[in-house]
Amino acid sequence: MLKIKDLHAGYGRIQILAGVNLEAEEGQVTAVLGGNGTGKSTLLKAISGLIVPWNGSVEFDGEPVEGLRPDRIVRRGLVQVTQGKEVYPAMSVEENIKLGAYVRSDRQGIADDFERVYSYFPILKEHRKSHAGILSGGQLQMLCIGRGLMANPKMIMLDEPSSALAPQAVMDIFRSINRIRRDGTTVLLVEQNVRMALLLANYGYVIKDGVIHMEGLARDLINDDNVRLSYLGGTVADTTGAAATL
Amino acid sequence: MLVDLVMIGLSIGMIYGLVALGISLIYSGLDIVHFAHGEMYMFGAFIGMTVYTQLNLLYPFTFVVALLGTALMGIVIERVFYRRLTAGGGGYTVAGMGIIICGFGMALFLQNLAYVIWDPTPKPFPVDFGRAIVIGDIYYPRVYLWIVIMAVALMVVLNVFLRHTKLGLAIRAMARNKDIAFLMGINVPLMISLTFGVACALAAAAGVLIGPINHVEIYMGYLILIKGFAAAVVGGFGSLPGAVVGGVIVGVAESLGAGYLSGNYKDIYAFLILIFVLMVRPSGLFSVETKLKA
C-alpha cells in the first residue's frame, strides 16, 4: 500500500533522512521505532507532504505522491495524525471531530464514521458537547485520531500516539489502534514505546540516524537480542504480561 | 451637539473598524503585520472614484468593483512578495521584521504608483446622497448613515462567512494551525490568499465609503494605517470583534475631542486613547482568547 524508496529529507540545509526504504502492507500495522531525533517524525512529514522530500520516491496505493501538497495527499486517502495533540480548544469535541471530514460531502458516510469514531472512543461521545479544551491528554489523543479517521482514510499514520500519556491511557489508545486495523484501515505507527508497538504491529522498522537500521516481523524483532538490549529492557515475563492486556 | 458628534464619530469609527478588521484578520491568519494596508484603502478609494466618475456606475456597483479590484491586487501582492518571506516565520519574530520592511516598501511603491496613475492633486468623489436628516437639533448627513449601514452589513457578512460556512471554517482552521489544517485536507495556500483578499477588500470598502466625505488623494493611506492600528490595538490585536469596538471607540473619542476640545488636535485623541489602553490593559479590551484563532 505504501512504498518508500531511498527517501532523503530535512529542514533547511540540515539533512535528517538519509535514504529510507520502507513498505507498509495493506490491512496491517507497520511500526517505525526509534529514539528521539532519529527522524521518525520527519519521515511522516515527508510522506504526508508537510515537508517536501529532497530525493527518493513515495508511492501510495500504486501512485507516486512525493512532492504533492498535503491536502491532495489527504484526498487520496493517506492521513497523518501529528504528535502535538493539537485541537481547537474553543470548539466542541463534536465540531473538532467533524473538521476531519472537511474533504467529504457524503452525509450518510460522515454520520456512519461519527458512530465508528464514537464506538472506538465512547468517552468522546460522553463529552461531545464540551469544549475540547477540557479534555485530558489521553482524550485529546483520541480526539486527534478520531478526527483523522473522519477523512475515511485508506491508511492512517500516527506519530507517537502514546507520548506523554498515563499507562492506562496508553493501553486504551493501543487497543483502539488494534480495532482500527481490524476494521480495515492500514496503520503506520511511529513509536518510542517499542514494546507496545511491537506487540501490536505486524512488521517493524527500527530507524536510526535517518536510515532504517533493522527490520523484520514484529514477533521476531521483539525477541531479537539487539532490539531487546537497545530498546526494551525488562524480562520476557513483562512482555507477555503486557501482551495479555491488548 | 453631543448626539451629532457621537453619531458622526460612530460613522468614522466604522471606517477605522473596517481597516482594523483587515489588519487583525491578516495578523491572526497569516502572521503578517501589514504596513501597506493603508494603501489598500487608498487604492480602493481611487478605483471607486475612477469607476464612479468615468463609467457613471451607480454607487453600489462602484463598491463591488473597488472591493474586487483591491482584493485581487492584495492577493497578487501577498502571493508574489509576502509569501516568500513568511516561509521563515512572521509576526513578532526576527524573521517578521523582513515582512514589516517589505510592507513599508510596498506602501511607498503603491503611493508612487498612484502618483503616476492619478497625480497628487486631491480628487473629488462626488456622490449625491440626498439631503441631510434633520430631527430637531440633530443634523445628520446621509452619507454618514450610509457608512454605518454598509459597514455593519459587511461586518455581519464577514461574521456569517467565518462562523457558518465551510470556507470560513477552513480559514479559521488555517489561522489556528497551518499544518493541522493541511492534514485535514484544507487547501492552505488558497485560504491564505482568500484571507488576504478579504482583508484588502474591507480596506477598499472603507476607502470607498470615506471618499465622498473627504477628497481622494494618494497620501490618505498613511494616517488611516495608524488609526487602524490604534483601533486594532485598543480592541486587542488579532481580535475581530475587538477591531470593530476599537474602531468605534477611537472614532467617537476623536469626534468628541474635536467638538469639545479642539478640532486642530483631532488626530491626537486616537493616540491618547491608544497610550491609555496600552498602559492600563496592554492586551487590549478583548483578550486573546476571543480572537479568530480560538
Image: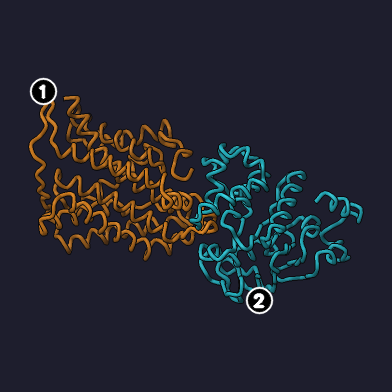
Chain colours: A cyan, B orange
| Count of numbered badges drawn on the protein | 2
Residue situated in front as seen by the camera: A233 or A187: A187
Q: CA distance from mark 1 to mark 2?
A: 82 Å
State the quadrant of the N terminus of chain B. top left
Per the image, label 1 sits on a secondary structure element best described as loop
- Badge 1 and badge 2 both on one subunit: no
Q: Residue furthest top?
A: B136
- x then y, percent, for residue A50: 55, 63
| Amino acid type of the residue tagged 1 in the rendering | Gly
Q: Residue furthest front?
A: A108
| Amino acid type of the residue tagged 2 in the rendering | Lys
Query: Image quadrant of residue A182?
Result: bottom right
CA neighbours of label 2 inside 10 A, class few (<14), some (14 to 19), many (20+): some
- x then y, percent, for residue B85: 43, 62
Q: Report the chain holding disc 1.
A: B
Residue on which disc 1 sits: B136
Residue under the image location 74 percent in, 67 percent down: A208
Residue situated in front as seen by the camera: B90 or A105: A105
Residue on which disc 2 sits: A5
Relative placement, left or right, of A217 versus B258 is right
- x then y, percent, for residue B253: 26, 31
Relative placement, left or right, of B40 versus B143 is right
Q: Where B124 sits versus A210, above or below?
A: above
Query: Image quadrant of residue B40?
Result: bottom left
Relative placement, left or right, of B107 versus A204 is left
- x then y, percent, for residue A60: 61, 71
Q: Where B107 sits versus A43, above or below?
A: above
Residue under the image location 34 percent in, 35 percent down: B245
